[in-house]
Image (cartoon, helix red, strand yellow):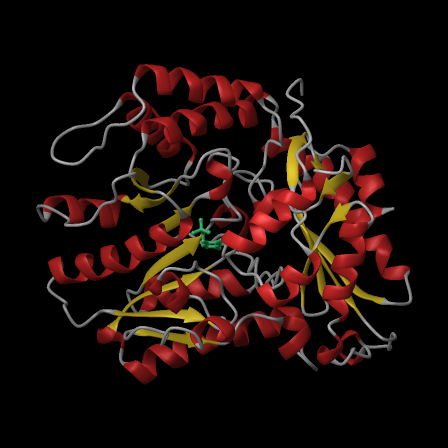
Amino acid sequence: NPVVPEMPDTLALQAQDAAHYLHPFTDHTQLHSKGSRMIVRGDGIYLWDSEGKKILDGMSGLWCVNVGYGRSSIAQAVHKQMDVLPFYNSFFNTSNVPAVQLAAKLAELAPPGFQHVFYTGSGSEANDTNVRMVRRYWDLMGYPDRHVIISRRNAYHGSTMAGASLGGMSGMHEQGGLPIPGIVHIGQPHYFDDGVGMTPEDFGLRAAGWLEKKILEIGADKVGAFIGEPIQGAGGVVIPPDTYWPEIRRICRKYDVLLIADEVITGFGRLGRWFGSELFGIEPDLITFAKGVTSGYVPLGGVLVSDRVAKVVMDGGEFTHGFTYSGHPVACAAALENIRIIEEEKLVERVAEDTGPYLRQRFASLAAHPLVGVAETCGFVAGLNLVRGKAARLHDQLRFDPALGVGMVCRGHMFNNGMIMRAVGERMIVAPPLVMGRAQIDEMVA
Ligand code: PLP
């Protein structure tokens, strides 16, 4: 990457940061005593801070920089589009070239039965769109009572009022009076927490059964949709047993409940498929996407709308919903170039056939460490549990007292020593850029 910025004055920046910047998801009482670490440059899978220290980014930023940092062709595509047409919306019978081209491309890449896309600026806005689109769909179908949406505890679906309500993070519900009405939660398919004494297969069926129970409790005539991440990301890389999603699909079909797959993390190659729905056999009616669609270079999100839903919504006249930045030409141009790179470098196939299996094998070797319990991967997401000691049965592994914050300590130690991981309780997570090669996997695992 030829673009090497001048090193800023770190202390001066940290002082301005503390004085003026209210950060998202940050405990400022901690931040201000230490000061933010300023990230100034990226290239491939590496970042550099304002003191010139190199960091291996095991998290692809926030699970999004799928093609890695420093892709000048995306910068050029953005520059060109800004010169030609920096903005025009697609409200009121207008459209723009990159938005149309990207819609056609997404229809080509999506699972069968998806020919339409609704654009947003982020994953959160896309999930808000889902709530309104599901309710609009059932209104038009003549079932205005089918407005309840079922989600799962510990899910993450964004930070807007609807996104955070769909999410099942208790820490978020505690702030701002959430969830909003009409959104309810069931348990998550977390085998290592809740599957004691069961096989993963039996537990998968049991966890899916919680959906059926909830539908019957509420009344199927009131339930509009179920939403879930194929793999729960922010909740700690919760990989469901293979039996889970087919059973969820069966239940949704049985009660005619729409199925929403939130693929904000799992889309665009992360699991070795264009969409994680294909890997798990989900067959959703709506797919939320964001992050990997542009590899985070420019904000963009949206909903892939199945033909079933699209026909009803489009035949129903105006859907009174949209954002100024829906179908932003610059973001769509970035996405088109990002997707071209993913295709040209066969990143989806690489993760499926080469680097994904290699990561699985290398990451699993960490389980030999006395302080590591389960160490598992799916495509290019991986999680391991820090434990106080091992036991014969996985569920009996000796856990740290959560109050110790062992995961956060480990995360801080890693960060100070040149690598970014994420911590969710005692679960340590990586989701590296899809361009990471075998030697870099070795470096990360070491
Ligand atoms: N859905 C999932 C599964 C996510 O992981 C995220 C973000 O991490 C979102 C939705 C929200 O996306 P955004 O932060 O772009 O609003």
Observer able to see residue 105: no
Q: Residue at x 60, y 26 (%)?
A: 346
Q: Residue at x 50, y 57 (%)?
A: 24
Q: Nearer the viewer, residue 184 or 202?
A: 184
Quadrant of the snapshot with the N terminus: top right
Instruction: State left or right for residue 298 relative to residue 184.
Output: right
- Residue 189: x and y in percent read 56, 70
Q: Please, which residue is most extreme toward the bottom here?
A: 217
Above or below — where is 123 with respect to 393? above
Q: Nearer the viewer, residue 378 or 203?
A: 378
Instruction: State left or right for residue 90 relative to residue 325.
Output: left
Q: Quadrant of residue 133?
A: bottom left
Q: Nearer the viewer, residue 7 or 75?
A: 7
- Residue 52: x and y in percent read 76, 34
Q: How many numbered callouts?
A: 0
Instruction: State left or right for residue 315 relative to residue 8.
Output: left
Above or below — where is 152 with respect to 349? below
Observer able to see residue 203: yes
- Residue 220: x and y in percent read 27, 75
Q: Residue at x 16, y 28 (%)?
A: 94
- Residue 354: x and y in percent read 72, 35
Instruction: State left or right for residue 391 relative to residue 421.
Output: right
